[in-house]
Structure formats: structure tokens, C-alpha cells
Image (cartoon, grey):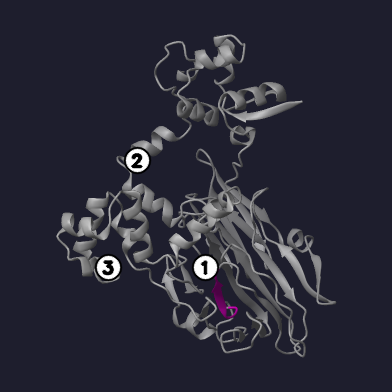
Amino acid sequence: MKVLLDTFKVVHWMNARKITGHQLAARLTIDDGEFGRLLAADEFDVPDEFAELLAGQLEIELSQLSGGTVKDLVVIRTAAEMRATCRAVPRDGIHFYNYYTMAAPTGKVAPVVLDILCPADRLPALNNGHLEPAITVNLGPGDINGRWGTELTEATWQRMRAGTSAVPWVAGDSYVEPSFCPHTYSLATDVPARIISYTGVSGLEALVAETNTWSDHAFDTMAESVSDGSPAAILRSLLARRGHDVTSLAKETGIPHERLAAVADLTLDELRTVAGVLATDYRVLLPPMRAYDEVGKTFCSVDSSVASIRPFHDYEVASLAAAPHLPDLTGLYVRIDNDTPAPVLDLCDLGETHYFVLDGEITLWWRQDGDGIGSARLTADGSAWVSPFVAHGWSGSGSVVKLGSGKHMSYLDYLELSNTFQARQVLRRGRRDRLGWGYDAQDGAQG
């Protein structure tokens, strides 16, 4: 049996482990030249025994070397293809939802469309929530009831209204929900309704996965140390990490002890002084902007969306729910009215983008590798996924819901890049890096 390995991952781990190609080839009992030929391709197939031995010598899991990375620029799912994904979801003894899956590359999370089937005269049963924050959009045509808690309050029981005929491309109310927020929906009348549920990427995903392997006492200590993520909690952790306390920090910064104790009240210049002494990024000590209700959700009404309508390139757009504490989770209503037969490439986004067609007959255009232009004609219920930084655009007459999250260039990536010395050069060197670490002239990985 053969295993597909990624050359660039192999070279990365050779560099990280400070092992030359010559040394690694000897441990794998193959000739230097043969090992160099393996690393000449972007990916290579080897017997699983050899792959396990290679991973073992690099002291990593085999999955950390796996190849077959998705290379899609655009993925299209027609209306018929989406409807073919329909599956019924029972809950609380009734047919509760129908789920449909929108376009996405194989192995990646895709937004879903749900038929809301719980009747208006029944209190819908709650789910348990999920780690990923989400945007939910009422697609209409009817209103729905949203529920977010056991006790019913203004925050935990709210009507999500559908759009109106006055601006039909603004389909309905929307909201952003936080991690692990229980939620559910029922019809508000006898008029049918659907929603889009778009679970974005959680910035905590990697940390949460890693803590599954930690000891209980280490996890409990970490959870207590971060507290509510306040600047004061972060400062306590930074002080301990760097061998400081408030007294020594006051001495080195010249900022009075009592002011340091109330870090949220420090001026920007004082925060930078503190960060300079602690050799850290002052931005982690800034108080976050938060905008949510008592259960953590941020709501956007149809009226608010309509009030936000504005021109953008050759389109009209209107905002969906958004929150400053979830900056990667984004959404827009987009109205397209451009019947040009020429390709349109006026959009380019920093992260992956999902589109759902609300109405009309429209064409998605995108730049392919080289000078080629791809296109796809879509109608209502069609959907598309577009890779980050791929130029694309729409023509025809219709409207879409546009959704995005931080799967690729997240705000955390931008913070990291803003701290990286010669960031552009680092990115260019790091991409498809075949250079060995430079200590072995016979190293096949040096090319």
C-alpha cells in the first residue's frame, strides 16, 4: 500500500529537526540521489512502511506529512445538486429540519440551508451549540421563531422576520451566535421558511483540540489563568511568564503601581511602554470591543440591513449581522444587475468566500491559473465557493448572499504578519520551500 507525502512538509520538518538530507537518507537506508529524486516533485508516493519510518525519524505523526492538498480555485454546486443533498433531521419526535449542503471543496466545512419544519404552535427543542461561531440568515418567505435558552426572555426568544417586497433581495433578519450557544428554530406562522446556517472557523479550534491531550490540572490552571480574556488576566500571565510582578514592572516603566493594577485604564502610550518592557504585543492588552446581548448573539434586522444599502463596484450590497469580537465572520446581501457579456473580475477577498443565489440567473466569473477565465451560470439555490485572493465577479440579474470566515487569512494571521520581520520575504521563502537548512552540500532537499 502506498502513501502520498507532501515534499514541502517533509523539507519543513527536516529543517525544524535540524537533520540533513544525507543524514535522513542514511537512516532510511536509501541512496542520497534516490532521496533527492523523491523530493524533486511536489508530492511523492512511497510504501506505507517507508512513510512510517520517515515520520518516525522526524519524530512526528504521519498525518503531518500527508499530501493531496486541495487546490480548487472555485467549487460550484447547481440548484439541482444542492437539492440532491437533502436529508431529513428528526428531533423531539417530529420531522424538524431538512438540511441541504452548499458548495465547498471536499473535506472542508460548507454552509447549510435548512427547511424550518417545527410548527408555530410547538416550542422548538434546543440543540447543544457548537464551538464554531455562526451567522444565521432567514431566507423567508415566512417569519421564524428563534430560541436560545431554556428560560424564555427577550434575548432567548425572538422573531426573525423575512424581508419585504419593497427590497426583495434583502431576504430577512440575521444574527451572529457565539461558541456553544444552544439554538433552535420554529415557524412563526403557517408560511414556510428557510435559513442559511454558516458556521465559521473558530480561532480557538487548535487550542481546544490540543487541550484534549493535556492533564486535567494543566487544563484547569490554563482555564483559570485566562479568566474572561480581560487585559488584566492577560497581563498577569505575561508578568509570570517573564519573571515580573507589578512592583518590578512599575519600577521599569515609571508607571505607578496603582495604575498598572487597572490596566484597562492605561493610556495607549502607557500600554506600549508596558509592552516594551515585557517584549510583547501591546494590542493584546487593549480592551476588546464587544456588542452582544445576554446570550452572546448580535442581531441585525431587515430594516437595519436595508438602511445599510450602498453601492460597491457595480453592485448594491447590504450588511448582514456582524460583531467586532468575531471579526472574521462576515456576510453581505449582494444585488447584481449587469448584463455585460464580458468577464467580470472586480472582487477579491482575503478569505474563502461562499455564495448562495437567492434569485435570478447570474454568471460567476473567476481567474484561473495562467491567463484563463472560468465561468458558471447559476440560478436560485445554486451556490459557489471561491478560494482566497482569487479575482472573481458576477454578471446578469439576480442576488446572492455572500459569507466568509477566517479559514485562511484570519485577523490573527494579520496580527502575526504585522509583527513579522520582512513579512513579504518570509511568505515568499516559506511557500513551496525546498531549501534544506544549509549544512550539507549533498542534501537533495537543497535543489
Mark 1 or 3 closer to N-term? Answer: 3
75 left or right, relative to 271: right
The amino acid beneath tag 3 is Ala
Q: Which residue is mark 2?
A: 424
- Closer to the camera, 231 or 359? 231
- Closer to the camera, 272 or 35? 272
- Closer to the camera, 381 or 38? 38
- Closer to the camera, 135 or 180? 180
The amino acid beneath tag 1 is Gly
Q: Quadrant of residue 217?
A: bottom right
235 left or right, relative to 432: left
Q: Quadrant of residue 39?
A: top right
- Residue at the image point whose x is 47% and y is 57% from the top: 347
Tell me how far mark 1 sits from mark 3, CA to CA.
Answer: 39 Å
Say whether marks 1 and 3 touch (CB < 8 Å): no
Label 3: element kind: helix
Residue 175 among those drawn in magenta: yes
In this rendering, is residue 327 above or below 157? Answer: above
Q: Which residue is mark 3?
A: 261
Q: Quadrant of residue 227?
A: bottom left
Tell me how far mark 2 sits from mark 3, CA to CA.
Answer: 38 Å
Which of the image's four quarters has the N terminus?
top right
Say whether marks 2 and 3 touch (CB < 8 Å): no
Extent of the magenta region: 171-178
Q: Which residue is mark 1?
A: 331
Task: Estimate how packed mark 3 is, as few (under 14), some (14 to 19) or many (20 or more) residues with alpha carbons within 10 Å.
Answer: some
Q: Is residue 160 visible?
A: no
Q: Position of residue 101 (x, y in %)?
A: 71, 61
Q: Position of residue 17 (x, y in %)?
A: 48, 27
- Residue at the image point whose x is 61% and y is 11% from the top: 30
